Amino acid sequence: MKFKIIFSLILIATTNLYAQVVPDSLKHTPQVPVKENFADDWAALSKYKKENEELGLPKKGEKRVVFLGSSIFEFWKQKDPGFFAGRPYIDRGISGQISPQLLIRFRQDVIDLKPKAVIILAGSNDIAGNTGHVTNKSILDCIASMAELAKKHHIKVILCKYVPVYEYAWNKNIKDASEKIISLNKAIVAYAEKEHFTVVDYFTPLVDERNGQKAELTVDGVHPNLAGYKLMEVVTEVAIKQAFKNRY
């Protein structure tokens, strides 16, 4: 009996000593939040996911138009937010994206938003990437798939003649960029005419004598400045009105 009492006292003393020696940081280890891994989100669906949920469906009579593209569209809203404010225009541009990424995003960032029309600007980043696997056909295949999805969901299709580019400052290994853009634009226009889609011409208002962008309308030879976007806004409004008249 005496042995049991002595053992109990030793155990209590040891426990108290341990409690005094062990730092609080070890006794109460904080839970570190696990950072979500977006390695599988190649098309950056996460970028607009929350914004899309907050946006909701169009109001009755709203003629919503989604602008789907890369940096040209993403920077547009930054340069001239007033063009989008008060209009049913939804900017869904993501800098650096190529046409297959736009295709992956098409359901979430276009179809699910229930727009009346979509403006698809694609191809320049495919060319600028210099992967060696890009052709007009591969770009047009993605554009055609997006257009067919839009048509199936009763969304008017507006395709774009891409803005002129003489040279990509970040990848000067791309030779004859201007000729590649012109060739792509011809292919897009031919496809649009065949399918009776509307075309918005972003090339002609911005082009200079070298088939690049006019210096006074661009920040880097690829992306328009505010003055450039103002010209794009004029032809965009015309194209949207024309698209809503089309009866395909």
Image (spheres, rainbow, N blue to C red):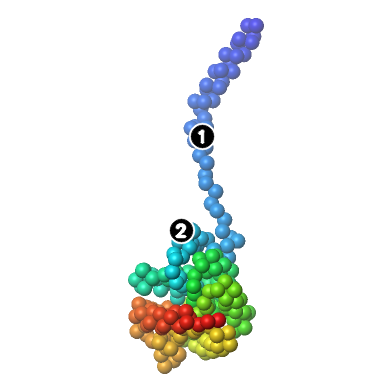
Q: Which type of secondary structure does the marked residue at label 2 adopt?
A: helix
Q: Which residue position holds label 1? A: 28
Q: Nearer the viewer, residue 247 or 196?
A: 247
Q: Nearer the viewer, residue 198 or 50?
A: 198
Q: Residues within 10 Å of mark 1 (few under 14, many from 20)?
A: few
Q: Amino acid at mark 1?
A: His
Sequence-first disc among 1 and 2? 1
Q: Nearer the viewer, residue 154 or 34?
A: 154
Q: Residue at x 45, y 83 (%)?
A: 242
81 is higher (above) or lower (below) than 8: below
Q: Which residue position holds label 2? A: 54
Residue 183: x percent and y percent?
55, 89
**Residue occupying the far bottom of the picture:** 209
Residue 173: image tag: none
Residue 187 makes an appearance in the image: no
The N terminus: image quadrant = top right
Q: Quadrant of residue 232?
A: bottom left
